[in-house]
Amino acid sequence: MVNPEHIEFLDKVFVRRPYFDAAGYKVGKLQEVLKTNVFKNAIWLASTEFYKELEKKGFEYDLLNPKERLTALKFYNRMTFRATPFGAFSEFSLADWAEGGKKAGGRVQNAVLHLLPSVQSELDALDMLPPKDDTLIAINPTLYAVGHDWRFTKYDTEKSGRLSFYVYMLQRNEVDALLLKYLKSNSQPKAKIIAYLKELTDCTDNDASAHVNGLLDEQVLVSEHGLNLLTGNSDGKKISLNFDEDSNMLISCDQALAGTGNLVDGSSIYSGLEIKELSSVSTEWQEVIRDAMAVLDLLAPISSKNDLITFKEAFEKKFGERSVPLLEALDPDLGVAYGNAQQAGVNGLIQGLEFAQPRKQSDQIQWTAVHQLLLKVWLQNGKRNEWEPVVLTDADLSALKPSGLPLPPSTSVICSVAGDKLIYQNIGGSTATALTGRFSAFSDDFMTFCRHVASQEAAANPDIIFAELLQVSHRKIDNINRRQQVYDAVLPLNTFPVNGSILPADLELSMQGGDLMLVHRPSGKRVIPRLPTAFNFHHNGMPLFKFLCALQYQSTRANLDFDPEKLFPGLNFYPRISYGKSILSQARWHISTEEVKVLTQQPLSISRLHLFCRQLGIPVKVSTGRSDQQLFFDLSNDAEALFFLENLRGAGEAVVTEFLGCTGPGEKNADQYNTQLVISLLNRAKVYQPVHNKFSRETIARDFQPGSEWVYMKIYATYESAENILLNTLVPWIADNHYRISQWFFVRYFDTDAHLRIRLKVDIEDVKQMQFDLQGLIGNLTVRGLAQKAYFDTYQREIERYSADLICQVEEVFFRGSEFVCQSLLNKPGSGNDGFMLWPVRHCYQMLLVFYRNDLEKAMAVCQWVSHAFFMEHDGDKKLKRSMDDRYREIRAALLYDEKQSFGDWELITHLNASLSDLSNASAGKPEPFRQKLIADIIHMQVNRIFKSEQRRHETFIWHCLLKMFVSAVKSGVKVGEGASVTMVGDV
């Protein structure tokens, strides 16, 4: 849970603000602003094409057409109100905490404009350069073997600059196999690779070079001079200029870039304006933020369904607790396609077409306690004015429960000051480096700050490797991904793997404790991916990258954003919601397309706008649009009101948000700039659990293909037919062939359809005959319509689940348990027999006693854990608990009463108990959590065998009964049956 006491504030605050102060903003000043070099410089860096259009007209406002005037006014507005760093439109700095804080007044002279070649210009230049003899070349990090061939991820570059990804198959040949083996450990210079190929094949230099170039073109191999986003102070790419708002940056850039080979064009430059000693931030806000985060942990929703959760469920269903190579785990054929991606190369006919991304069906809205709270204090609160803010109190929040999830090792709060309150724009993120990382490309101060954050994350989680993802996604957008290396380890995907990289081929994926566990095979350590930039990874089309990015957020409270619109979608108005000094959500209005048409009718009418705003409670200071399109207006000013209406024209539906920033001079905490604070927080508690030690390194066979000693068949049938086939066909056939079958067991399963899974261990010389006989047996059932289909499959032992040194004992328990269940089902009496109805509960009770050797305390402990887990799986509401309690009271006397009925063969019971006792002895040295899970899994499989359908519901109630039985036994010191001469089913 979000514990305010565990939150530690880093000693620096990332401050960002627009270049112009809001106090001096006037729409009528645009004519004057157009003439200033500082505005010209910002336009040139942002849009060279628009700059050239303005230059043609001498930056004379009167010569601009209406569209150009509106565009220029939007840039001016952006340079005054939007704090997000973008070229020379805004400034960034690191500030200190200080009691009371200090605002920087007026312009700060100590400013530096940092210039880097844009990602697109760099990649365009690299495309023209063939690899030289000393160029290092390595294997594509995503390459992996599939049978005798290889698969890897390729990309094509669309006209928009976006990289589209797909999985490509490379057919095996002996030369490439040996070459890939040669390059497996380390990259090599092209000259050495050519020499190796010449020696291997006796070919010419030209032939070898052509082969290497072909593999590079196909992206089987990658060059060190290919895609890369990391930069450093020693690579000579960055130029830093002392910023003078009166100077002409075109001349300065021309002089600075002379001789570098870089074109002097704003579009080829990535820039940032850093201000030194901008301000300090008042420490009073720290306590406000602590309280707000605890409140938001109660309010902010947690997604119940997303791509990672869907993948996790499918992965666990397919692989159980097996460790699977990462690249195979995400392969659509071998594993589970992440995000349902089925990648293939794009036909040239539609190459580069800008299709809209398919929309995902939104989650069904589930009614929660937060909905109930907001309904009470907002929608059904007759005491408040329709437009007035909703103020939450501790009393309002008392019924809400915390998430129970820990904060990430570091995270961020984006906020701004409005008088004596904080407005939150965003709270969360898997790491605080996500919002500061890209500025490390410009500033050594930011580099030091980011690396400090990374070191603190590692210090709190010493058994974890934090690996920085290296991935190029979009030639035009990837400037946001430019950075110096932040974390000690890097995980390259479509970039050159530098020495020491963690490669995807060295990673394995498994389930552990309900989490997906990414493990670095060579070191045995858990890996947590990190993307230290603000790039929205959902815009990337590579499933591997999206999966690793999503994995950052697993099982942490990484998103504390609170948006009432997500809870109550489709309303026209959402009020401001606050708690204490925190504004959790600003008031927001949705203006329909029809309303926009009325407002923007020609001639534009300010009075019509004011009337509309009064009717809807819209204040005079507002903003419209989101992200890069956000603009700010004071509707009490006629010029700004007309600007607002011009901006609405043709916009369709519009969203208007109240604007509370930029307090005026003389007000408390006055700030004439629309300043934004990015506050980084640390969670000193250990967040990530390390990989559990493997109990045995013993080599044991895992997979048994058809034709091996384990014969495995899946038989698809309805629930009733499956029961009929099991008891009346398979069991007699197994009895007739008992001399050839040393072990057998079955489970009931459902993956798209219900079926039986039957496994038989036979002598290898009998396998063919047994498979032939079994196929004929089931084939007759298929003809008769009892079985829908049946086929042999590979038996994959669940070694990770049960451990290598226990799997044989577990299979013996499964064998004896299957025998006992089948015999009991065959011996069951007619309907209405309460003794048979209750024997599964008694049977599971006895299994726990045998495994724990009558240790009632240990048996009760496992019942507490498992019963709670099943209860929560079925939503864990009071209605379910009450009904189970009532049902238990109805059957309690019968459970404890000795009916002297047994539905199983005593010899089979003896064998089952002996196998359980052997398993208990063999697992005695294991940690207790492992043993608890072991016996819980054993009982889970036994319940699965007993019931034809609804097994998990039956198991939920059985564990509920077991807990009550063991609690009573612990209190009384008497096991069930001892006081009443009970002969339990399963007693020896």
Image (cartoon, grey):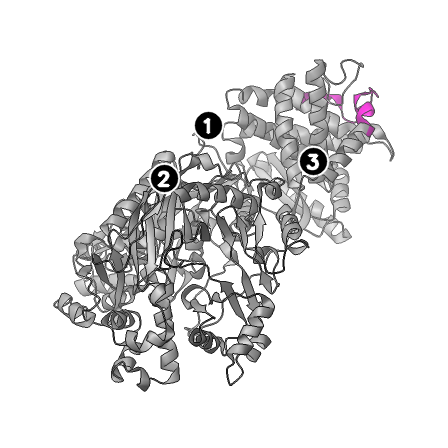
What is the three-letter code of the residue carrying label 3? Thr
The residue drawn where x is 70% and y is 35% is: 955
Residues tagged 1 and 2 counted as in contact (Cβ below 8 A): no
- Judging by the rendered image, the residue that carries numbered circle 1 is 695
Disc 3 element = helix
Q: Nearer the viewer, mark 3 or mark 2?
A: 2
Q: Is residue 821 above or below residue 312?
A: above
Which callout, 1 or 2, points at the residue further toward the start of the chain?
2
How many residues crowd around disc 1 within 10 Å: few (fewer than 14), some, or many (20 or more)? some
Main SS, magenta region, reads helix
Which of the image's four quarters has the C terminus?
top right
Q: Distance from label 3 to label 1 (Cα)?
A: 30 Å
Rendered location of residue 339, percent (x, y): 51, 56
- Judging by the rendered image, the residue that carries numbered circle 3 is 956
Which callout, 3 or 2, points at the residue further toward the start of the chain?
2
The residue drawn where x is 38% and y is 72% is: 74
- Judging by the rendered image, the residue that carries numbered circle 2 is 457
What is the three-letter code of the residue carrying label 2? Glu
How many residues crowd around disc 3 within 10 Å: few (fewer than 14), some, or many (20 or more)? many
Q: Could you say which is closer to the camera, residue 39 or residue 987?
A: 39
Rendered location of residue 677, percent (x, y): 37, 52
How many residues crowd around disc 2 within 10 Å: few (fewer than 14), some, or many (20 or more)? many
Rendered location of residue 44, percent (x, y): 26, 72
Q: Could you say which is closer to the camera, residue 456 or residue 690?
A: 456
**Is residue 908 on the magenta stretch?**
yes
What is the three-letter code of the residue carrying label 1? Phe
Q: Could you say which is closer to the camera, residue 970 or residue 559?
A: 559
Rendered location of residue 387, percent (x, y): 59, 60
The span shown in magenta is 890-915
Q: Distance from label 3 to label 2 (Cα)?
A: 39 Å
Disc 2 element = helix
